[in-house]
Image: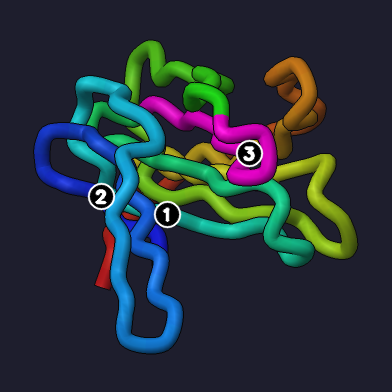
């Protein structure tokens, strides 16, 4: 079980039989609003309240890597484009939808919806 704390810390809670162990995985120093696993569970997207998107690879037990940083407006949500885990799609509060290459954070495509986006 992966979860985050308000302080921007990503935790892993390992449960086996009657034993539980909690491990700190990463500290990105920004409150995390969303955690999304890739379809094959090899990459975890972390979306922060400030609109930054990080990737974390549980098998590598490394630090979270900053992928995208919102410039003028915050990312509201992000998710993987399937099949695979090479691309993600994001939407900003201002209604801009973008497709990203996850290896280096290259923006491949964008579309402005010309509306403000809200989460319900």
Mark 1 lies on a secondary structure that is strand
Q: Which residue is mark 3?
A: 57
Residue at (49, 30) in percent of width and height: 54
| Pointer 2 local density, CA inside 10 Å: few below 14, some 14–19, many at least 20 | many
Dot 1 corresponds to which residue?
Answer: 35
Residue 57: where, in percent of width, then height? 63, 39
Residue 11's disc is none
Compared across the picture, whether 10 is left or right of 56 comes to left
Up the image or down, 77 lies above or below 17; here it is above
Quadrant assignment, res 16: bottom left
Reading the image, the residue beneath label 2 is 4
Q: In which quadrant of the rendered image does the N terminus lie? A: bottom left
Mark 2 vs 3: CB contact within 8 A: no
Mark 2 and mark 1 residues within 8 Å of each other at the beta carbon: yes
How far is disc 2 from disc 1 in space, using C-alphas? 8 Å
Say whether disc 3 or disc 1 marks the residue closer to the N-terminus: 1
């Amino acid at each position: 079980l992966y979860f985050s704390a308000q302080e921007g810390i990503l935790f892993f809670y390992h449960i086996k039989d009657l034993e539980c162990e909690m491990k700190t995985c990463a500290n990105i120093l920004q409150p995390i609003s969303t955690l999304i696993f890739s379809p094959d569970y090899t990459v975890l997207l972390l979306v922060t309240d400030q609109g930054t998107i990080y990737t974390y690879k549980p098998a590598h037990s490394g630090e979270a890597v900053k992928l995208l940083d919102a410039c003028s407006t915050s990312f509201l949500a992000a998710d993987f484009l399937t099949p695979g885990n090479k691309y993600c799609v994001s939407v900003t509060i201002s209604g801009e939808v973008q497709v990203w290459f996850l290896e280096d954070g290259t923006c491949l495509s964008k579309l402005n919806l010309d509306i403000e986006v809200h989460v319900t």
